[in-house]
Amino acid sequence: MNIEAFFTEDTKAALQNDPPGQWMPTLPDGCVRLSSGVPAPNLIPVEELQAAVSRLLEEEKDMPLHYVGSPNMAKLKEQLQARMLQRGIRASEEELLITSGACQAIDLIARILLDNKTVVAVESPTYMEALEVFQNYTEHFISIPVDEYGLQTDKLEEMLAERESKGLPLPSILYTIPTFQNPTGTTMTMDRRKHVLELASTYDFLILEDDAYGELHFQAPPVPLKAMDNEGRVLYLGSLSKVVAPGMRIGWVTATPKFINTLARFKKDLDHAFAQATMASYIDRTDLEKRLHTLRETYQQKCTALLSALEQHMPESVSWYVPEGGYFVWVRIVGVDTAKLLTQALDEGVSYIPGKHFFLNHQEGAEYLRLSFSYADHKEIGEGIEKLSKVIKRNLS
C-alpha cells in the first residue's frame, strides 16, 4: 500500500522541496561532533534529576503520573516567573504558557498567526527548525541579513518602507534570536534592539523573540527585547533545554493574557505533567545561579579553545564571528561549497552543519558552516578543527 498517496499536495510539495532531517549528518564512529548543538553528557545533571524524580514520587505517589498532574506544575510557573524577573521581564501567571520545548511554542504561534497569505520576516541565516515550522503554514517570507552585530535593522527598515510604498503586504511577525543567535552566535546591539521595537510599532507587526541561549553569556548579559517592550508586541520564548536538559522538553511563551489563552486553546497535548513536576522538583533543590555560572565558564573555555584552534589552523581566507555567549561559531569559506565538503570532513573524522540549511535560499549559505563548541571536550575541539582545516586547505588549493 502506498500510504503517501493519501498525503495532501502541500505535504508532498514540502517533502520534495526539503526532505526532513537532511541537515543532520549520520556520524561515523569516533567522529568529533562539532555539529551537535546540545550539552555535553557531563553537563547534564543526571544524579540531581534522578533525585528529583525519587523525591517527587515519594512525596506525591501517583499524582504526577496522572492527567491531572501535580502541584509542582504550578510551582514551575512560579520558578520561571522568578527567572524572567531577574532579566527584567515581568509576567503574571496568565501571561505564561509552558510548552514542550521552544519548538512546540513556535508551532503553536505559527498555527494561530499564519496562513497562506501571511508574510513572515526572518533573519538570514536563522534557526532551521523555525524555518521548517513557518514553511508548514506560509510561503511568503522577507529575509533580513545578519552581520556581526545581529539583525541589520536598517535593512529591515528599507524593506518595510519599500513594501509599503509599493502596496505590498507587510509582515505580521518578525522571528529573531537577538542574543547569541543560532547559527551565527551574534548578539543584536542595544541600538538595534531599540530600533527593531520602533519598527514594530511603526509598521505594526509582532516580534517573536527566541531567547534559548540568553542566560549563557560570557560577559554582561544582554537585555531581552521583552524587557524593553512597552506595547505587548514581543512574544517571548524561553527554554530550559540549554541550561538543564533538552530531553526534559521544558519551554515557555510569555505574552499578553489573551494571546496565551488562545495558544492554550490549540495546545492539545494535555501538558507533560511528569516532566514539568520533575523540573520543578529539581529547581526547588538546585542553586541554578551556581549551575549557570559553571555552564558559562565551561562554554566560554570551550569557545576560546575553538577560536584558538581556528586561529592556529585555518588559512587566512577563512573568517568567523566571535560570539559573546551561547553554543556556536559561524564560519565562512569563500569559494567552497560546505555541503559538498561535508562528506570529506566526515571521512576525516569531524562534523559540522552546512550553512545552506539556515537560509530560505540554500545558495546563500553555500560558503558557510556552523560549528558548535557545546558538546566536544577541549581535546576533541582542537583535533576536530585541525582535521577540518586539512579538508578545507585541500579544497582551496
Image (cartoon, grey):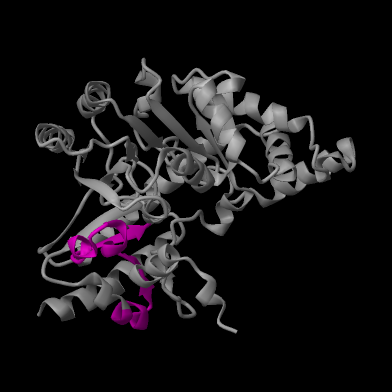
User: Is residue 106 something one can see in this rendering?
Assistant: yes
Q: Residue at x 34, y 40 (%)?
A: 175
User: 285 left or right of 351?
Assistant: right
User: 331 left or right of 178?
Assistant: left
User: Is residue 82 something one can see in this rendering?
Assistant: no
Q: Is residue 344 magenta?
A: yes
Quadrant where the image shows the N terminus: bottom right
Residue 346 lies, in percent from the top left, at 36, 78
Residue 184 lies, in percent from the top left, at 28, 50
Q: Residue at x 31, y 62 (%)?
A: 357
Q: Quadrant of residue 281?
A: top right
**How many callouts does the rendering have?**
0
Q: Residue at x 48, y 55 (%)?
A: 38
Q: Nearer the viewer, residue 379 or 278?
A: 278
Q: Quadrant of residue 367?
A: bottom left
Q: Residue at x 53, y 46 (%)?
A: 104
User: 119 left or right of 10?
Assistant: left
Quadrant where the image shows the C terminus: bottom left
Q: Is residue 307 magenta?
A: no
Magenta residues (range): 343-372
Task: Give the answer, above or below, for where 152 lies relative to 391.
Answer: above
Residue 178 lies, in percent from the top left, at 32, 36
User: 271 left or right of 332?
Assistant: right
Residue 34 lies, in percent from the top left, at 38, 64
Which residue appears farthest toward the top when viewing the image? 230
Q: Quadrant of residue 19?
A: bottom left
